[in-house]
Amino acid sequence: MTRSDGRAKDQLRPIKFERNWLENAEGSCLVHFGRTRVLCVASVSAGVPRFKKDSGEGWVTAEYAMLPRSTESRSDRESVKGKLGGRTQEISRLVGRSLRAVINNKALGENTIVLDCDVLQADGGTRTAAITGAYVALVDALKWAKNKGIIDSVEKVLIDSVAAVSVGIIDGEVRLDLHYEDDVRAQTDMNVVMTGGGKYIEVQGTAEGAPFDKSELDNLLAVAAQGCVELTKLQLEALK
């Protein structure tokens, strides 16, 4: 069955990385997953949280948010509401975990890198776009830190690359990189985070409609893995 945006079932949306999108940040990237756009900004600062103090290790963390008009109707800013929603906290932690998985904290030293991921426009897959774009911003921030003498080597700090993509089952068909119209119709919805070396960092899968069996799970993971391979190539090309 043809998807509403005309893509093949195993085809990524058009992917684009706009590096150094902000002048003041150590690293920044505006990532496009089709109509979804997320601004990922990496900030480097000396020192670490209290629980890491005197450990000789650094810390990487993330904050995720959606702008009020990133969707069709305006949503209130969570800062105005006075508390973060559960979804916002969950995705912030996911992005942080994903980036920490490819960092050598000892080589980073007692420095902190914060990744701010702000969704400018949402058409599905905002968390996977955030992770994939945040990696590009992180690399540029580490290059900045190397030039400033804060770290010895980018290669010593970065163990591997990281990318993420969504997959799902719609009308009995496994589809890659779900946009909004796919997402709302999915019987099964899954987000997969992988290293460039092909290892899994996180798999989030839910049966929204009918439960899925082992063969369907294997198919979902295989399609997601191929998507992450393609995203990794695009990240490397953008970082040249």
Image (cartoon, rainbow, N blue to C red):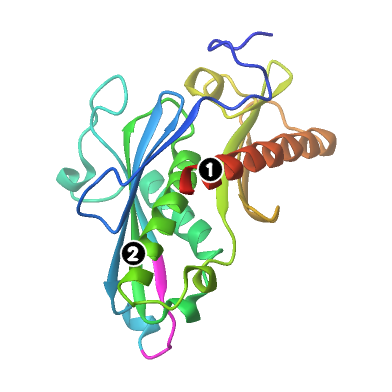
Q: Toward which corner of the image does residue 141 lie, by quadrant?
A: bottom left
Q: Position of residue 61 (x, y in %)?
A: 39, 63
Name the secondary structure under disc 2.
helix
Q: Toward which corner of the image does residue 58 lie, by quadrant?
A: bottom left
Q: Position of residue 111 (x, y in %)?
A: 34, 76
Q: Which residue is mark 2?
A: 144
Q: How many numbered discs?
A: 2
Name the secondary structure under disc 1.
helix
Asked whether 94 or 211 is in front, the reply is 94
In percent of the image, x 66 and y 17: which residue is there? Answer: 8
Figure check: 48 above or below 85: below
What secondary structure prevails in the magenta region?
A: loop
In percent of the image, x 79 and y 33: which residue is there? Answer: 216
Kind of residue indicated by mark 2: Trp
Residue, far left: 80
Kind of residue indicated by mark 1: Glu
Q: Which mark is residue 48?
A: none
Placement of the N terminus among the 4 image quadrants = top right
Kindly indicate whether the residue at mark 1 contacts the one at mark 2 (C-beta within 8 angstroms).
no
Query: What distance separates the C-alpha of mark 2 from that of mark 1?
Result: 19 Å
43 falls in the magenta region: no
Residue, far right: 215
Q: Which mark is residue 237?
A: 1
Q: Is residue 155 left or right of residue 136?
A: right
Range shown magenta: 54-60
Figure check: 130 above or below 171: below
Q: Is residue 155 left or right of residue 221?
A: left
